Amino acid sequence: MPAYVIATVTKAWDHDKLVEYRERNTDAVAAHGGRFVVRGGRQEILEGAYSPLRVVVIEFPDLDTARGWYESDDYAPLRELRQGASDTDIVVVEGV
């Protein structure tokens, strides 16, 4: 069953670090069998007070693979880079 990592950026203060993060994370996601389904792009709030700066959705083959990417040695320095440049909420959800 596929799993989706959903990341919502709520604050960003270091554009250069975030550019580096995005470039390097592309390879890390692919190395763990993931693919980007949503990566920024135009968004419209249809209902509620949800107001992210950026939304990213990554599809993985399953929950364990998604968790493997997030907990991997190759993602650890990227996670630290992102955390030093933005406030981001991240959740993983099983698909159907």
Image (cartoon, helix red, strand yellow):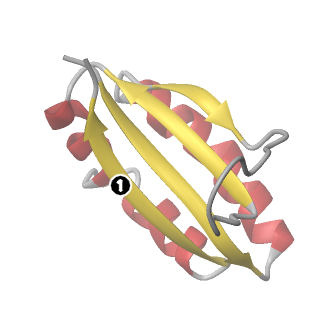
The residue located at (84%, 68%) in the rendering is 16
Quick one: quadrant of the N terminus? top left
Front position in the image: 74 or 7: 7
Front position in the image: 30 or 2: 2
Q: Position of residue 76 (x, y in %)?
A: 38, 63
Quadrant of the rendered image containing residue 31: top left
**Count of residue discs:** 1
| Residue holding disc 1 | 91
**Left/right of residue 28 with respect to residue 94 in the rendered view:** right
Quadrant of the rendered image containing residue 2: top left
Which element type, helix, strand or loop, lies under badge 1?
A: strand
Quick one: quadrant of the C terminus? top left
**Left/right of residue 10 with respect to residue 18 in the rendered view:** left
**Left/right of residue 33 with respect to residue 84 in the rendered view:** left
Front position in the image: 53 or 65: 53
Q: Position of residue 29 (x, y in %)?
A: 46, 34
Instruction: Find the residue positioned furthest to the left.
Output: 64
**Left/right of residue 89 with respect to residue 13 in the rendered view:** left
The residue located at (21%, 25%) in the rendering is 62
Instruction: Find the residue positioned furthest to the front.
Output: 47
The residue located at (19%, 34%) in the rendering is 63
* Number of other residues with Cα within 10 Å of mark 1, as a class: few under 14, some 14 to 19, many 20 or more: few
Front position in the image: 36 or 42: 42
11 versus 67 height, above or below: below
Q: Position of residue 82 (x, y in %)?
A: 58, 69
Q: Position of residue 40 (x, y in %)?
A: 75, 44
The residue located at (79%, 45%) in the rendering is 44
User: Residue flagged by tag 1: what amino acid is it?
Assistant: Val
84 versus 52 height, above or below: below
14 versus 38 height, above or below: below
